[in-house]
Image (cartoon, rainbow, N blue to C red):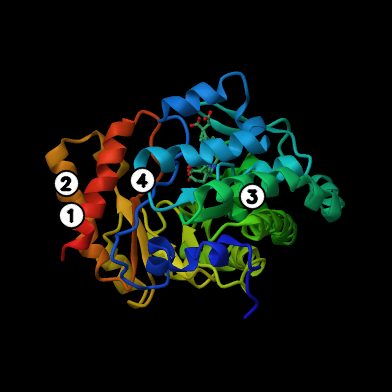
Amino acid sequence: MPTLPAQHPWNAHDTAHSALVSAYRGERPSRQPVWFMRQAGRSLPEYRQLREGTTMLDSCLRPDMAAEITLQPVRRHDVDAAIFFSDIVIPMRLAGIEVEIHPGRGPVLERAIRSEEDIIALENSDPDAFEEALAPIREAVALTVAELGTTPLIGFCGAPFTVASYLVEGGPSREYLYTKSLMFSRPDLWGRLASWVADRSGRFLRAQVEAGASAVQLFDSWAGGLSLEDYLGYVQQYSAAVFDHIRELPIPRVHFGVNTSELLVAMRDAGATVMGVDHRLPLDEASRRLGGGTPLQGNLDPAMLFASEQARAEAVRIVLERGRSAPGHVFNLGHGVPKEADPLVLTELVSLVHELGVQA
Ligand code: CP3
């Protein structure tokens, strides 16, 4: 198996044996690892202050800023991993697509991408120019891991269905009507678009790994809008193509979606080594569906951050207990930290997970 360079944190800081990576490998480390999706961002006052006057996507492309924002929750909460501060639409922006994040809404395009001409234009864009445009990403990751030391950095990207849904709809969507219509009526065109997105997202992911990430997570947040049959027929192969960009490297590959209880096995079979589970499915049932051999990540309901301390502690205990039915378990929320969350509650939650995680 090809290895990572000597200076990569995997070797230089032995992140290969961190609590996070051990649990991702199916082991039971002495410290129960925990991190949160969207741990960086608007729940933190230091983030809101730093971001003032800079747009979301611009802040992702300023290496010093992206590194600092990535580190903020690690310093504050004592989580067992950092997740690189960026966005699933950053590769699209770097490929020349005009996209902005509208606060409270999400990614919005200047012009939706739906026609054959639109897709041909994407196919004609230069992959070498794209690799060069990834320079600020590599630089931000390098700055981040230099500060993180033994704490692993998780790299990520969006899966083709979720990213393409923003491109085809032109913005956030509930029903994915234009995306599904392209899929069902022009499967050839859909396949070309999904392949192109998989290539650029895969290169973005690989750049993060080469620059120092010790695990990756593929977000197919909106795949839960698909039936299992349609996922298998139109989506799985393109998510597998993203994983292909890093498949030969020894690092863990997490795959996560919302409302994807019926797709868990198919998503694992796209090439994940760990499954992220949202809060709708108990972890013991998730493990059973996966045949008992797949390490899991998840899955406290984010709403528990707003519940009483007592209700939250009981829910944490149950998640940890059910997580023991899988070969390895990394504690997380069932989806991202809401912007209204109290950062003090998050810090206390981390310490509770560490405390309860070693009992048992
Ligand atoms: O801490 C982390 O988890 C790392 C950073 C991260 C961001 N986006 C930063 C961000 C990650 C992993 C993402 C991935 C992402 N982006 C996903 C998949 C994960 C998920 O939430 O399901 C999706 C669907 C997107 C697209 C997107 N970007 C949405 C829906 C939004 C929210 C819009 C809003 O205002 O509610 C964004 C913006 C975004 N990405 C923010 C952050 C911190 C908030 C923007 C801000 O601070 O102004």
CA gap between label 3 and label 1 equals 36 Å
In the image, is 65 to the left or to the right of 92?
left
**Residue 314 x/y as whole percent:** 14, 49
Residue, disc 4: 78
**Residue 356 x/y as whole percent:** 19, 55
Pointer 2 with pointer 3, Cβ within 8 A: no
Identify the mark at residue 142; answer none if there is no mark. Answer: 3
Residue, disc 2: 313
Pointer 4 with pointer 1, Cβ within 8 A: no
In the image, is 22 to the left or to the right of 66?
left
> Does the rendering let one see residue 292?
yes
CA gap between label 4 and label 2 equals 18 Å
In the image, is 320 to the left or to the right of 39?
left
Taking the view exactly as shown, the residue that stands out farthest to the bottom is 1
Residue 30 image-quadrant placement: bottom left
Query: Disc 4 on helix, strand or loop?
Result: loop
Query: N-terminal of the two: label 3 or label 1?
Result: 3
Give the foreground label among 3 and 1. 3
Pointer 1 with pointer 2, Cβ within 8 A: yes
